[in-house]
Image (tube, rainbow, N blue to C red):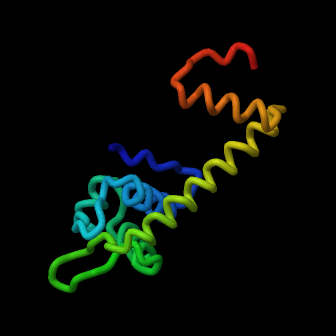
Amino acid sequence: MPWDLDSDRPVFAQLVERIQMDIVSGRYRPGERLPSVRELAAEAAVNPNTMQRAFAQLEQMGLVYTKRTSGRFITEDEDTIGELRIKIAREETDRFAARMKRLGFTETEILAFMRELMKGEESWEHY
């Protein structure tokens, strides 16, 4: 999956967010070894020092740990991963709900909109 980094936001923060998403979505499984700093930096087309900084942040958060001679691994603590997943979901839904309210939708309309979206319906003409 392409890295699609946005020039309007710090690259470091985007790397952390992307790897977090890869962890909570299951792309990287608990206990799985991560690609090396150089491999991921090349894939993302960023400086390895920037990727190293992102890895250090992920370690501070408890999502990644280092084995001296083996590399970096995803935490096996599924509660930590689950809590992050919920936190990200809440942030995304809060952002969505706030934007919908600014567009003038009521709570009832937003919920109806989401129900239709989850059913896969593509017609929003009655809104």
In the picture provided, is 42 more to the left or to the right than 25? Answer: left
Which quadrant of the figure has residue 38?
bottom left
Q: Quadrant of the N terminus?
A: top left
Is residue 122 or residue 71 the one in the foreground? 122
Q: Residue at x 58, y 28 (%)?
A: 117
Is residue 22 or residue 106 the one in the foreground? 106
Query: Is 73 located above or below residue 18 in the figure?
Result: below
* Percent coordinates x, y for residue 94 in the rendering: 69, 51
In the picture provided, is 53 more to the left or to the right than 83? Answer: left
Q: Quadrant of the C terminus?
A: top right
Q: Residue furthest bottom?
A: 68
Query: Is 63 located above or below residue 127 in the figure?
Result: below
* Percent coordinates x, y for residue 14 in the rendering: 49, 58
Is residue 61 or residue 110 the one in the foreground? 110
Q: Residue at x 57, y 56 (%)?
A: 9
Q: Residue at x 64, y 48 (%)?
A: 93
Which quadrant of the figure has residue 116?
top right
